[in-house]
Image: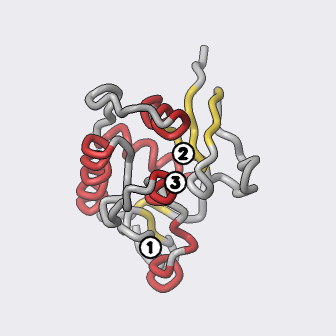
């Protein structure tokens, strides 16, 4: 029997709690934009509760699996440079331990909770100049398969 989990839209930040992630976000209409998030992250964002550090932290391998699943439903891939991916994920998880949420390690949160939600990984990177110009997200975690070989 499956259990319900939390999912967050990487475009608008909408949360869904259910057995599977929605294909289309009911808030922003983005397709295949949801990513699995742990209960701690959902609690912080949805209820702005104090971070319970140390509980439900994800290891690199677990988060890597989530990111691979996310990429498999979209038109981009995880960067084939696995050393870069591991280094980036470690930075994301370090931010989660220190700041309570999985902020991109390449961008600095301002302290404004609402504005900083845009810095959660994965972010809405396809609107960024780095995606348009270089075919990669801000930190290089996701890349355009047309520009990067596997």
Furthest toward the top, the residue is: 1
Quarter of the image where the N terminus is located:
top right
Q: Residue at x 31, y 46 (%)?
A: 99
Depth check, front residue: 41 or 44: 44
Distance between the alpha carbons at the discs numbered 3 and 2: 19 Å
Which residue is at a point 31% across and 26% down the rendered structure image? 55
Q: Residues within 10 Å of mark 2 (few under 14, many from 20)?
A: many
Q: Position of residue 11 (x, y in %)?
A: 60, 58
Q: Residue furthest front?
A: 112
Secondary structure at numbered mark 2: strand
Contact between marks 2 and 1 (CB within 8 A): the answer is: no
> Which quadrant is the C terminus positioned in?
bottom left
Image location (x, y in percent) of residue 13: 58, 50
Quarter of the image for residue 49 reads: top left
The mark that comes first in sequence, 3 or 2, is 2
**Which residue matches tag 1?**
136
Q: CA distance from mark 2 to mark 1?
A: 18 Å
Q: Which mark is residue 35?
A: 2
Near mark 1 (Cα within 10 A), the count class, few <14, some 14-19 or many ≥20, is: many
Tell whether 121 sits left or right of 132. left
In the shown orientation, is residue 67 left or right of residue 21?
left
Residue 24 in view: no
Res 134 visible: yes
Decide: is 18 above or below 27: above
Query: Residue 75 sits in which quadrant?
Result: bottom right
Q: Crowding near pointer 3: few (<14 within 10 Å), some, many (20+)?
A: few
Rendered residue at 23%/57% (across/down): 87
Q: Earlier in the sequence, mark 2 or mark 1?
A: 2
Q: Which residue is mark 3?
A: 114
Q: Secondary structure at mark 1?
A: loop
Q: Position of residue 137 (x, y in %)?
A: 44, 69
């Amino acid at each position: 029997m499956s259990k319900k989990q939390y999912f967050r839209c990487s475009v608008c930040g909408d949360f869904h709690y259910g057995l599977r992630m929605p294909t289309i976000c009911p808030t922003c209409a983005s397709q295949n934009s949801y990513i699995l998030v742990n209960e701690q992250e959902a609690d912080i964002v949805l209820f702005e509760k104090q971070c319970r550090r140390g509980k439900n932290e994800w290891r690199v391998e677990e988060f890597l699996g989530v990111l691979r699943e996310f990429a498999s439903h979209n038109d981009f891939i995880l960067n084939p440079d696995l050393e870069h991916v591991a280094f980036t994920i470690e930075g994301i998880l370090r931010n989660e331990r220190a700041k309570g949420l999985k902020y991109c390690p390449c961008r600095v949160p301002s302290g404004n909770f609402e504005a900083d939600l845009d810095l959660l990984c994965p972010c809405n990177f396809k609107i960024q100049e780095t995606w348009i110009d270089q075919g990669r997200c801000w930190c290089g975690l996701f890349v355009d398969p047309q520009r990067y070989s596997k």
